[in-house]
Image: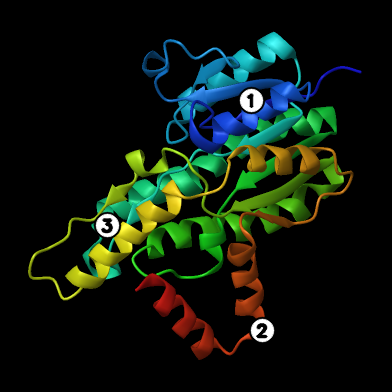
Amino acid sequence: MKSKVVLITGGSSGIGKAIGVYLIEKGYKVYGTTRDKSKYPTFSDFPLLVMDVRNQNTIAKAVESLMEKEHALDVLINNAGVGITGPMEETPHEEINKAFATNFNGPLSVINEVLPIMRRQQNGLIINITSIAGYMGLPYRGIYSASKAALEVVTESYRMETKNFGVKFTTLAPGDFATNIALGRYHAPVIENSPYKENYQTTLKSIDEDVDSGGDPRDVGRKIAKIIETKNPKPHYKVGSFIQKFSLTLKSILPGLWFEKLLERHSS
């Protein structure tokens, strides 16, 4: 059987790279994307295409280059994303717009570029990488949570609109995994006389510790492979520690004020 062709945005590092390496081992033909190939001169795990999900021209050129080589695209994994932290009141709107440009608008632009291809093939799978954080408004991470929640919801619309074309959509929401995501995260500055200073600093420390002690990103690759091999994927999947996934169950069964207290206690 012909190997399935997979395109992973943001595939040069972190979870994207881990997914790609795992899928290569499973026999898939993988392409990743990066905004700047010169930053990865020794990268050899799989081919990297130049793409900035905020720039439609680079999206079109990358997809065209892939199609010239493979003449098919079976799976798109929208993984490219950025972190952002800060008190809602003090997070600059310019940075909010940048986060949504990458985490929400960007995936939509890539989806809309590949949909005509998959429609012609009458076959395709699109997996949007969201976050367990997208299921709740976390303190000092509200913009990140909102951008991932928006991608969760819009995936449901795409699923229903494209079902008749043979194109399948789903999301995968990871918890905390040991990656280099902290290096590219935007942190609103800690303002000396801010009423949020103490709590925000505590949260920043907690976020970095959670990432450092996070799970093996290969677990995300394993979950992705299972989704690809599933005949009829569900709308949403999660991957992470038991407590991270269980938090979503708690949110669905606990009164709102109780769950909010749990979040506040965990974040303090």
- In the displayed image of the protein, which residue is found farthest to the front? 213
Q: Residue at x 84, y 38 (%)?
A: 229
Question: In the image, what residue type sits under mark 1?
Answer: Val
Q: Which mark is residue 93?
A: 3
Quadrant that contains the N terminus: top right
How far, Cα to Cα, is label 1 from label 2?
A: 38 Å
Question: In the image, what residue type sits under mark 2?
Answer: Ile
Question: In the image, what residue type sits under mark 3?
Answer: His
- Mark 2 vs mark 3, foreground winner is 2
Quadrant that contains the C terminus: bottom left
Q: SS at mark 3?
A: helix
Residue 152 at x, y percent in the picture: 61, 57
- Mark 1 vs mark 3, foreground winner is 1
Q: Is residue 233 above or below residue 71?
A: below
How far, Cα to Cα, is label 1 from label 3?
A: 36 Å
How far, Cα to Cα, is label 2 from label 3?
A: 34 Å
Label 2 environment density (alpha carbons within 10 Å; few <14, some 14–19, many ≥20): few
Q: Residue at x 42, y 10 (%)?
A: 41
Q: Residue at x 56, y 39 (%)?
A: 79
Residue 151 at x, y percent in the picture: 57, 54
* Residue for badge 2: 253
* Residue for badge 1: 21
| Label 1–label 3 contact, CB within 8 A | no
Comes first in the chain, label 2 or label 3: 3
Comes first in the chain, label 1 or label 3: 1
Comes first in the chain, label 1 or label 2: 1
Label 1 environment density (alpha carbons within 10 Å; few <14, some 14–19, many ≥20): some
- In the displayed image of the protein, which residue is found farthest to the left? 193
